[in-house]
């Protein structure tokens, strides 16, 4: 019985080649888009999970307004580190700043070493 269903389906697919192509192409592109969206969501949810205490990491953003145009950036002035230590020092064990212009190696009294390039 099942073999008969496959025969009928194959005959109908070969009989209507245009509609078959449209249906298969639509199904394939829909599955590809769904897979890409799923991978993107997974990447966003697992960001920085390779760190031991990933739930204790924070990134400071600075919001500026120049000539009436608002912008946000992760580059902060050097003096902001001391302010963060004073205001949020009890929340975090370490407050570190790194530069994005040149490669740096950060090490703080442990064998753990982070390299920012």
Image: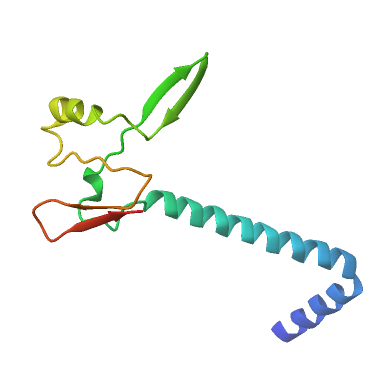
Image-quadrant location for residue 49: bottom left
Q: Is residue 100 above or below residue 37?
A: above
Can residue 1 be seen at all in this image of the molecule? no
Q: Pinpoint residue 99: horizontal percent, then vertical percent.
A: 32, 42
**Residue 23 in view here:** yes
Q: Is residue 104 shown left or right of residue 28?
A: left
Residue at (49, 20) in percent of width and height: 70
Percent coordinates x, y for residue 12 in the rendering: 86, 73
Which quarter of the image is occupied by the N terminus? Answer: bottom right
Horizontally, residue 59 falls left or right of residue 35, namely left
**What percent of the width, then of the height, locates residue 41?**
47, 50
Closer to us: 106 or 32: 106
39 versus 57 height, above or below = below
Which residue is farthest top?
A: 68
Q: Quadrant of residue 79?
A: top left
Q: Answer above or below: position of 110 versus 77.
A: below
Which residue is depicted at the point 56% across and 59% down? 35
Q: Is residue 47 left or right of residue 23?
A: left
* Colouring scheme, one of rainbow, by chain, secondary structure, one colour: rainbow
Q: Which of 43/85 is in front?
A: 85
Q: Residue furthest right?
A: 15
Number of numbered discs visible in the structure rendering? 0
Please tell me which residue lies in front, 47 or 9: 47
**Residue 81 or 14: which is nearer the viewer?**
81
- Residue 90 lies, in percent from the top left, at 10, 32
Where is 58 relative to 103, above or below?
Answer: above
Q: Residue at x 26, y 31 (%)?
A: 78
């Amino acid at each position: 019985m099942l073999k008969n269903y496959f025969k009928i389906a194959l005959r109908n697919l070969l009989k209507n080649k245009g509609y078959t192509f449209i249906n298969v192409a639509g199904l394939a592109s829909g599955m590809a888009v769904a897979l890409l969206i799923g991978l993107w969501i997974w990447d966003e949810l697992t960001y920085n999970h390779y760190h031991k205490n990933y739930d204790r990491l924070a990134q400071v953003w600075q919001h500026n307004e120049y000539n009436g145009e608002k912008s946000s950036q992760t580059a902060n002035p050097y003096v902001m580190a001391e302010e963060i230590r004073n205001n949020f020092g009890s929340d975090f064990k370490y407050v570190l700043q790194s530069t994005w212009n040149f490669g740096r190696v950060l090490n703080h009294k442990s064998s753990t070493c982070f390299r920012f390039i």
